[in-house]
Amino acid sequence: MKIQSYNEWDPLKSVIVGTATNANFPSDKLFQVQMSQAGWTESPPPIGPVAQKIIDETNEDLDMLCITLANLGTTVYRPEPVNFQWTDGQYAYCPRDNLLVVGDKVIEAPMSVRARQHEATCYREVKRKAILSGVKWIAAPAPDLYLSENIAADGKFSLTNREPIFDAANIARFGRNLLYLVSSSANRRGADWLQSVLGNDYEVHITDVYNSAHIDSTIVPIDEDYVVLNADRVKEDGLPWFIKSMNKIWITDDMIVPQDFTDYPYASKWIAINMLSVGNKTVICDKNQPLIHAELEKHGFTVVPLELRHARTLGGGFHCVTLDLYRDVYSS
């Protein structure tokens, strides 16, 4: 099995697509507090098994994504089944959260949620094949999130810098430059650890533009020369040099059609810009976002419209529910 991916836009040749099977909202109090940081106060974070209707409809949508990717020439791998409802884990819906591919390396992230620290077991067969083919597969040391020294309470959830902590989805890859979001799911010590592992071949750049969670509904590179930006969170003068030189597609609040959710929004309406580039200026995007489609097409992109009906309920769009394993190197 070949693994090679330096960025978010080169032609996609193999990918993992997640599953909603056995999805669960953990009872862990730390997870509940972390979820609450997004600011939603009208209903409490859910606990327990996700409704079967949501699981079934999500799996239908993910199956359609797999078919679409296969028709585009991409080999698709799926997670192995795990009973998250029995273990009080979460899910294998978002492989992007747990695994980071940098060049020919795969890094298991030191997850910020206890319930997800063993989620990499869902990818045992991919891991086995990758290691047999010589891929460098590295597991970050899991932080002890039972230790109060790792969590600053002060009425709000925040991470200290005692141990490296980050979710893989806190990182956007721009070739040799990696943009690392410090937030409620990643600390600065995690960026230091990642830099030490990658060495001089890559540079990890820290940003704190958005505090709640992951980067891929805020800064979304989709081509060597183009990046999609959340206009509510991002300011031009706060961008690093390698993004300032790119063409910017600014998405404003009024361009988004807010997606419905069930009981509690695990993701904000900005999940609408969580899109997957498959290369050659082609992106898979939420089919219910006509203004975003029009903006992308204005810049010469081909939009493949698909749907994840429960993206906000489960907390993941098309970038979240995929993990590219191999992209042809057109640029790095």
Image (cartoon, rainbow, N blue to C red):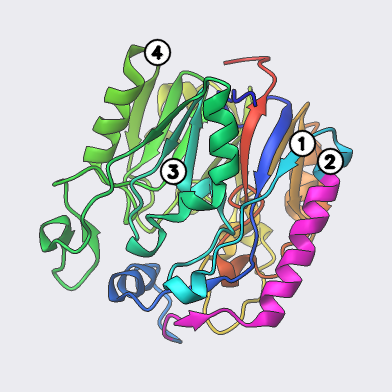
Residue sitting at x 75%, y 45%: 284
Residue at 74%, 34% (x, y): give it: 278
Mostly what secondary structure, the magenta segment? helix
Residue type for callout 1: Thr
Asked if the residues shown at circle 2 and circle 1 are in contact, with their CB atoms under 8 angstroms apart, the answer is yes
What residue is at 28 percent from the left and 48 percent from the top?
Answer: 142
Evaluate whether residue 56 shows in this view. Answer: yes
Which residue position is annotated with label 3?
Answer: 168
For the residue pair 149 and 7, the one nearer the viewer reads as 149
> Crowding near pointer 3: few (<14 within 10 Å), some, many (20+)?
many
Q: Earlier in the sequence, mark 2 or mark 1?
A: 2
The answer to whether 289 appears left or right of 108 in the picture is right
Q: Quadrant of residue 10?
A: top right
Query: Which amino acid, mark 4?
Result: Asp
**Depicted 176 relative to depicted 238: above or below:** above
- The label number, if any, that marks residue 201 in the structure image: 4
Amino acid carrying mark 2 in the image: Ala
Decide which of 122, 278 is in the foreground and name it: 122
| CA separation in Å, label 4 and label 2 | 32 Å
